[in-house]
Image (cartoon, coloured by chain):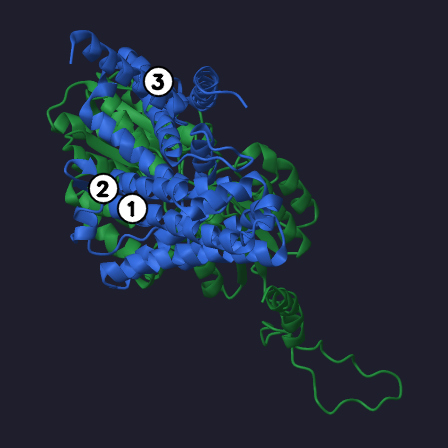
Amino acid sequence: MSASQNEATASGGMRRAYRGIQAMQEVGVLVALLILCIALTIAAPTFKNSANLLNVARQASYYGIMAVGMVYVVCMGDIDLSVGSIFTLTNIVVGLALQAHQPIPVAVLIGLGTGALCGLVNGLLAVGLRIPMIIITLGTLSVYRGLALVLCNAAPISKFPKDGLFFVVGGGDIARIPTSVVVMVLTGVIGWIALTRSIAGRRLMAMGSSPLTARLSGIPLDRYRVVVMTINGTIAALAGICAVAFLQSADPSTGVGFELWVIASVIIGGTALSGGRGSVPGAIVGALIIAVIGNGLILLQAPTYAATAITGVVIILAVAIDAFVKRRTQPQH
Amino acid sequence: MKRIFQAALLTMPLLLVASCSPPPAAPPQGNTPPSTVSSPPPLNTPTDGKARLKIGYVLQVLNDFTGVIKRGAEDAGKALDVDVEVVGPPAPDSNAAIGMFEGMVQKKKDGIVVIPMPGAVWIKPIQEATSAGIPVHTANTTSDGSASLAWFGQDEYQSGVVLAEQMKTLLEAGGKKSGKVVAGVCAPGDAALEARYAGFKKGLQGSAFTVTDEKDVGIENTKNYSAWENQTTANPDMVAAVGLCSMDIPNLAKVKTRSHGTWLIGGYDLNPETLEAIKAGTAQVTLGQHPYLQGYLPVLALVKQLRDKKNPPKGWVNVGTEIVTKTNVDTVTPRENDRAVETKWYADYVAKNYDDLEKVAKPMPSMHP
């Protein structure tokens, strides 16, 4: 092959790579995260330390895990406000099981089962009563949190052995990566493949895009809604279990307010609130952005009372950057 | 399948109503012969004919700390043979708490205790209760300018000074002559926490130790851990970390262990994880504020006033600040971990120190001298 032919091949490859990046749904939010990280690295050099970056990833992992399930819910045109409470209830249930000297695999299964049951109840209530999911989960948000308070008498649970693999590895790291981050990535990969490469995933997007068309096409909407809510509850429970492993205690205050940050992660990541379009990797990047903001404000010694307002402003900026990049790189419909 | 499910959901309320007992039969009237079955006496009527006192207690939130207050109040009820109803919202929500307080007034409780957070919004509800003839005490935090009779709590400002003195002593004993102390608050703006921080800052004044401005570390457990983790990254030169809320010491201890930190830890409250951290030496000092007494004593005061016709205490009943370090943690732990030990310990403590509440009461301390 001649030199000019080699050059043509190389530049053709670069053009294909560039077009591939342009086509990525997540390009905007990735650019936003990158800009944030670069800015923080300049303003607070401690930010780029590997220990700090791993801490930030772990801090994002609870939202990130839960965001994977929420992408599915939002894609099909719904919202689940009870995920924070499912996280709390699972946290408490697992703590109680461990305190009752249940083997760790049993305690974990009980936790996952609790989350699945909560999700199933959400789905069945919405489908059976024909009430929007957001309303049902607004109610179950209080039910599940109240149940957690009743079960633990509003007190943290920490009197159980903490030397098992569950805490050492589950609450530690795998190849120096915090285990909850590994769980987030694995959940994300599975979630992404299922959403984008399976018939069920495509049907979910169709449901959110046009429920009438989806129904007329023969997609059993009610069954999908129940299944997705059950999966979402299970994933929220998984995050709650990771929290027990890491914090080595179960606390009824855990998970309060999580639903808003999980939904924010999903929206920042490019999932359409109206349904029909979603990105699991984008949602995880959205969770990372939220954690980076929290970490950055502390590293920059931002005034305490202003920190909450600054967080909101930075989130709006991140979404604006995402929208700007998308407009520039992707064809408009 | 769907219709069966819907039918089941709609039938459930009907089944519930049907399973309730029927109302008691109306008393016989006119020439109707009297029933041969006498109606049962009202519940909780002592044989001496006096009605059982009903005390209401409204917490600002339900958590592990207020759970101890609740235990104290309920133990007082049992010991004094009165009905004590303790309620509180599941998350900090003054509107919900005021609603519960007003419910207690509507239920015509004989006396009410409330944790008024924030104090300013409780002036009117407390006034309305006292105008209805219901005496009100406050606990844990106060509502300045309200019509409540007495406040049962610790001097928050002074507790901050005490904590600062303890930290200074511990730092100097560890060879530190100067350095930065990071202070974290879980709810910025809360009056009690602001008073603690002001006292802590005052306590370190004049020393070579400096304290940062209050860092918002949040109430939610994972956020609190993450915030402290980030603070230790942002302040690698800190010599100590002080948390003003109950969840701080357990999370600080975990951060310190994982990061192999050598900084000291101080804070508040005596929950089991905190005491374990003190015993292990990971944390150095914690201050207890006897939440059990914050539950017990105002109920006792109301009963003495309403039933025994004693003068109520007015002003401030100091429940005391308890300093716990490694040297005395073993004496405190059994009481904090065993319900029966707790009840017995406090019964003796109250009998010894709070026999005459009116005499023990002092003028209100200043929150921000």
The vertical placement of B319 against B10, above or below, is above
Picture residue at 78% right of the left edge, 79% below the top = B26
Task: Give residue A253's position: percent from left, percent from top.
Answer: 40, 44
Q: Chain of mark 2?
A: A
Q: Earlier in the sequence, mark 2 or mark 3?
A: 3
Q: Of helix, strand and loop, which one carries label 2?
A: helix
Q: Residue furthest front?
A: A1
Report which residue position mark 1 lands on: A242
Report which residue position mark 3 lands on: A36
Can marks 2 and 3 be said to lie on one chain?
A: yes
Picture residue at 54% right of the left edge, 48% below the top = A137
Picture residue at 31% right of the left edge, 55% below the top = A95
Which shade of the palette goes to chain A? blue
Q: Residue furthest top?
A: A4
Q: The chain shown in green is which?
A: B
Mark 2–mark 1 distance (CA, rounded to whole Å): 8 Å
Query: Which residue is at the front of the view, A292 or A244?
Result: A292
Local crowd size for mark 1, using a 10 Å CA cut-off: few (<14), some (14–19), many (≥20): many
Q: Which mark lies nearer to you, 1 or 3?
A: 3
